[in-house]
Amino acid sequence: MKSTIKPAEGKLGILLPGLGAVATTLIAGVEAVKKGISQPIGSLTQMGTIRLGKRTENRRPKVKDFVPLADLNDIVWGGWDVYEDNVYESAMNAKVLEPGLLYSVKEELEAIKPMKAAFDQNYAKNLTATNVKTGTRYELAQQVMEDIQNFKENNGLDRVVLVWCGSTEIYYEASDVHSSLEKFEQGLINDDKLIAPSMIYAYAALKLGVPFANGAPNLTVDIPALIELARITETPIAGKDFKTGQTLMKTILAPGLAARSLGVNGWFSTNILGNRDGLVLDDPDNFKTKEVSKLGVLEDIFKPEDNPELYGDIFHKIRINYYPPHGDNKESWDNIDIFGWLGYKMQIKINFLCRDSILAAPIALDLALFSDFAKRAGMSGVQEWLSFYLKSPQTAPGLPAENDIFKQLIKLENTLRYLMGEDLITHLGLDYYEELVEVK
Amino acid sequence: MKSTIKPAEGKLGILLPGLGAVATTLIAGVEAVKKGISQPIGSLTQMGTIRLGKRTENRRPKVKDFVPLADLNDIVWGGWDVYEDNVYESAMNAKVLEPGLLYSVKEELEAIKPMKAAFDQNYAKNLTATNVKTGTRYELAQQVMEDIQNFKENNGLDRVVLVWCGSTEIYYEASDVHSSLEKFEQGLINDDKLIAPSMIYAYAALKLGVPFANGAPNLTVDIPALIELARITETPIAGKDFKTGQTLMKTILAPGLAARSLGVNGWFSTNILGNRDGLVLDDPDNFKTKEVSKLGVLEDIFKPEDNPELYGDIFHKIRINYYPPHGDNKESWDNIDIFGWLGYKMQIKINFLCRDSILAAPIALDLALFSDFAKRAGMSGVQEWLSFYLKSPQTAPGLPAENDIFKQLIKLENTLRYLMGEDLITHLGLDYYEELVEVK
Amino acid sequence: MKSTIKPAEGKLGILLPGLGAVATTLIAGVEAVKKGISQPIGSLTQMGTIRLGKRTENRRPKVKDFVPLADLNDIVWGGWDVYEDNVYESAMNAKVLEPGLLYSVKEELEAIKPMKAAFDQNYAKNLTATNVKTGTRYELAQQVMEDIQNFKENNGLDRVVLVWCGSTEIYYEASDVHSSLEKFEQGLINDDKLIAPSMIYAYAALKLGVPFANGAPNLTVDIPALIELARITETPIAGKDFKTGQTLMKTILAPGLAARSLGVNGWFSTNILGNRDGLVLDDPDNFKTKEVSKLGVLEDIFKPEDNPELYGDIFHKIRINYYPPHGDNKESWDNIDIFGWLGYKMQIKINFLCRDSILAAPIALDLALFSDFAKRAGMSGVQEWLSFYLKSPQTAPGLPAENDIFKQLIKLENTLRYLMGEDLITHLGLDYYEELVEVK
Amino acid sequence: MKSTIKPAEGKLGILLPGLGAVATTLIAGVEAVKKGISQPIGSLTQMGTIRLGKRTENRRPKVKDFVPLADLNDIVWGGWDVYEDNVYESAMNAKVLEPGLLYSVKEELEAIKPMKAAFDQNYAKNLTATNVKTGTRYELAQQVMEDIQNFKENNGLDRVVLVWCGSTEIYYEASDVHSSLEKFEQGLINDDKLIAPSMIYAYAALKLGVPFANGAPNLTVDIPALIELARITETPIAGKDFKTGQTLMKTILAPGLAARSLGVNGWFSTNILGNRDGLVLDDPDNFKTKEVSKLGVLEDIFKPEDNPELYGDIFHKIRINYYPPHGDNKESWDNIDIFGWLGYKMQIKINFLCRDSILAAPIALDLALFSDFAKRAGMSGVQEWLSFYLKSPQTAPGLPAENDIFKQLIKLENTLRYLMGEDLITHLGLDYYEELVEVK
């Protein structure tokens, strides 16, 4: 398998629709890392290690030393946004990173100016866009494709990937226009309102064989039309919704409770955050998209249909509150009502003082690097092994998603081992004790 | 493999050294379950399911329907204690279960009277024992063996297992007398003070081929002498320290942080509890045993030697405070200082309002049932696949322990699948997407 | 002053509109106290002490031994409700008190059957009433007066008081029909929909000279028409909204922050509760009434107009979430963003695992006893000294409310001292040091 | 009274024994305030307002505009320390304030160099002093007096005050040498080890008529000998232990529970902090001094002897844990077990993410300014009205302390009103309702 993976030669362009808090934190961070000022903490590709072989072999290389990923020094940034601010200005506004740090990469950030966005006010009412393209959806798609190609040529790039870092769009479900590539392309021509702006970017990317990952909870690439296109152009796709903060904690903790067969009858989750994301989510239509994405994880992990006595009656409530005093310093509070032996009740309270964009940025980076790797490894279509990074993972049609972050991690790691020709790890490990057995 | 496992026919005796809060909660609970009054929540063997085959096969039997375990109705209880109270009286004193529930199984509990304990005041200073055997350590071991055999004969049992549910002994390390079976047996004859009371029970059990699991953090069966004996008599052993409460949470959460390459620079854990366990742990010598058991888990999970930038400098502090107002309702509070992208700091606070014995009882049950199963499956010596239940897992000499509860779970599940002739699960799952690949 | 207070002779009837969780917890509790089974914890009149004279005099009688209050043994209960359940049945449904306790006062509780309620579905959409009076508002008022008089005669009572323990009504403001007694009485005759059901009870009580206290946030007796009536019939009134749970904590903590001139720029308060009150408040119209009552307290305590640098920009958000798993065990979580010296930021998190009706019942008792006492002491109209018990205290027109619970307490205590002819306490206490001064 | 207060003319010297985190935060802060860079948040004298007259008069001047206090611009700083670092260096080491802020007052801070300290290693084992005076205790006292006089003359000061900002000394109780001024002065000559270093400073100050306030829990000025001296030289004294963090919260919350007659049966308090104070308190002897200071507050507020049913059996435990990851960002966690109506249990959890020196600095400032004011107002000896700022208030011999922060506040405010010739406030306020009464 290993021999078929193309090397990561040349430059990789990472294009980000949405140059807000997450995107600018990502770009500024990688530039600071390149200069040796900072470390890419939170990025599995850069900081993580992977066990190979037996426990006793002590082989634990860094992921980036094991798998041929693009080097950070080979990355070139670009993107689109509804505001004209360059990345330095946008990062200053976002107030995620300290001015001193941003100042040290000011030149690099100022050079990155957003291309005009493909936007539709109906999909994000609380935003007032000023830097937008005009035309029908078909025309917008053409313009985005031109943007991508120009970006590639102007920068002498070998490869490009797109990662959606824009706001959450209002809630919508897949409809007829999304059901096949043919209908979708007709819809573009008809300027069909049911085609969301994020789909235009995804279409443009896939058409050009450029991998696309979706960091927001909107459907975007999770529709039959674009899955079909991804297969045709042999392009990897992944979505949806960066798994950060409260949902990250939930998919860590819930598998632990399930592992121990501890019952759950209530899970109350509330969040306070004060960034632009919080403002957008203050609109009920946009919140619904996020809520659907966040609500699903427990059901998959607890499987109430298989364990009705334990998980058949969970009251699960999620609230997001716009709370300006905290800015990007998102904070979550969870109350979990569990029951154990003979039904006796216990409670877990989790208070996570996190930082929204700090958690999201390394995920966006990893998705970009792994999507590019997948393309070079000849993988195409839905990349379920990247569900590790996603709140609401896209899977093969009909296949239930796996939200347990530890199963997602094994899937990711065993995929890498498989592609690189290493043994899969099952943690059986009875052989460590064989010698003992033989003694008798 | 499957065909070689002996069936679970006849009665299984479960003998518990230490008939305090955990043991009486276990016994009362199983008796209530037998009567249909309650459910054995928290027990993986009774309530848990296990996935078999592909995700799409939807095969998820209960563990007890997949593996031939002893039926709860075939269990007969017995035990030793330093107090004369029968199990009903002891359960009433423990104040874990409500009087109404205990009343419903009063008859069964009153019938279980503790045998005299093999005890040494030096190993638990805060206890004042009144129901103890006399004699040298050698004589005590003989008496315990007689107890076991009488118990088996008098109750017409097919098989017996022992699970240590006694208090935490003071801190001690393995010394010369523990280094080989020969020296150990000589030590018994010499009444060597370095042989802890719990070792006497373990020796007696193993000598008779009776599996032994250790729910406290003292070494007990985790010494070369008794590992040797276990191999000779082909008996499974497992230890040490039931993984409940704060450490359970820690081994759930820490793997999640490590999975995401999030750095950790401080972890402060404090506990308040007011039961007899809390009283014993108020003695610094006994606390040290517990502290050592609890401290180790982070190091294994984070592997600071492999990830010095992330985990090379963790300040880890654990406190246990005797706090009578809470009784058995142990409560933990954790503050975890983490850092993410570019070193930005975040905090996690976890407040777990748990119940000590409610969490421990189902673990004791599972260890008893799985130990018995392992014996019938021809497994002997250290059962690392049971580390899922243990704070400080015993492993093969020289083999680093695995404390990540999710790796422990996979190990347990894949062991069961292996023994029962099912495919191991690797979560690779690329085949779900093969069909799609072929389409193109 | 003392000589003019009429003694508490004979029986006192306490009539409660709304025989739900709070009322039944109150009644069952007092009956249990009468039998010596329980203690009236949380009741200042029964358990509290009051300092008299100098600190060095050590005079600290119980309030009930200092002030001539009705004895608990002289209380006779009655009430109205929209359901037919007697108080025993209603208490069992409320699931606040344990069945064992309720059983011990079953006979007394079963004897108390609700009179038919004056109800209007528009004021509480989530309730489905089955035990209601019919007629115009005027007729309903007449019927309630008859109920009160019959209750007094049938039980041989000396005095009666009413305490509103019903649900929160939808939000409404005072309008023309509430502006004078004349218009109000005409409104009754016209069956004016703007007259809320709770006002009908208040009118009936005041017309008969029966004190009325309001435990819900609806205006009820806080309108000019009824204040006028209270003055005419020389009757004490008090309102509104029992101060329990989160607001209790808020009016304890906020004065502490203000005392120290610590700045506040955010206060996020969320609640989860699962009782009938939670269900009613799930309707936005009813929640608004509660929200207005809860929001006001910070403004009064922090006085942003006087301290704009410290409190001029507080983001204050309150959420109440219906969460059935917790039943009456209301739980609140507060995040308070404060700033100190040079503007440095700090945070306070408060998690209150409280019990709604357990906190409210003793307040209802105290308001009943003190209202009766006030009547006997010749006080009439708004009793601001009872604001200690109320979330949104009623004051003289134009007089700003005092929400600081400690100022409210001093007001209450100094009022009692004043009425009983004791010196007021100012905590000046320089005289303790005079002797020392003289020494020199 | 007002006419007898001397005006705050000329310069005020503030001398601080101990130029560590608190002192440098204080000095840097005041200098930043003078430059208009920052605000003295948390200082009642600078930011607080005081109500005068009736509620309806709306008279709420700032305290500093009501009482003749020294102006911040008239303050001159000095101090002693066991290290040679100047205030800028020490502030940088303390890591409380951000480098940017410190840089803006660097010149002023660098100019303040510590005088050599009167030190005795036995009183703070974890410190390694390098900048110390030599000589007997008598000689040290003479040297400190010279320091004070030189400081006054060299800077052309009108008045001087001392505020102890040094570390907590080991636990000691008053003994014979502290029992009278005569014995104390003999003890100085004998170099009696029972005279703590802090007492040497206090003696020197009082001998010169310089007010002394004590911010640590050691006895210091709370001994008969120095009280006697304070009376002779007509000098105000105040102690002990700045009331910050957890104890501040405790004396805010406990009065609230007591006000409502809610019972308490357990209060567990734990702290994590990583500054030099935390290091000193890691020594059990020093911790004991702090523990005694912190433990006392509940007893005074709850008065178990008067309320045995509510407060007769409180399990109160306090822990301080040295936890370097948090530095000066002290964090406390409290679990409070309360019970209400009929004994039903509830819990309160408080998590305070505070900053030790940020809370202490404004207290030190207020104590300095008020001590100077008291001196000018002719007050001498123990200033109980300053107990508002202190964890373990010093009172007249035999007079029980008042720890309720709200009673302390009234005492402070009414003292100011009294001294300035304003009416005391009793919160009776019945007169607001007199007009209404007359209407009838």
Image (cartoon, coloured by chain):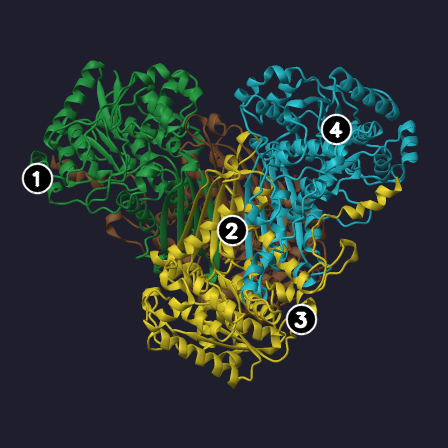
Chain colours: A green, B brown, C yellow, D cyan
Quarter of the image for residue D278 reads: top right
Separation (CA) of disc 1 from disc 4? 83 Å
What residue do we see at 53% from left, 31% from top?
C343
Separation (CA) of disc 1 from disc 3? 90 Å
Which numbered dot is residue B192?
Answer: none
Quarter of the image for residue C366 reads: bottom right
What residue do we see at 54% from left, 21% from top?
D99
Query: Label 1: which residue?
Result: A183
**Helix, strand or loop under label 1:** helix
Identify the subunit bearing mark 1: A
**Helix, strand or loop under label 3:** helix
B147 or D322, which is in the foreground? D322
Kind of residue sitting beneath label 1: Lys
Identify the subunit bearing mark 2: C
Query: Label 4: which residue?
Result: D162
Query: Label 3: which residue?
Result: C4
* Cβ–Cβ under 8 Å for marks 2 and 4: no
The relative height of residue B332 versus residue B428 in the rendered view (above or below) is: below
C425 or A226, which is in the foreground? C425
| Residue neighbourhood size for the residue with mark 1, other residues' Cα within 10 Å, grouped as few (<14), some (14–19), many (≥20) | some
The mark nearer the N terminus, 3 or 2, is: 3
In the rendered view, does C392 fall on the left or right side of A247? right
Query: Label 2: which residue?
Result: C400
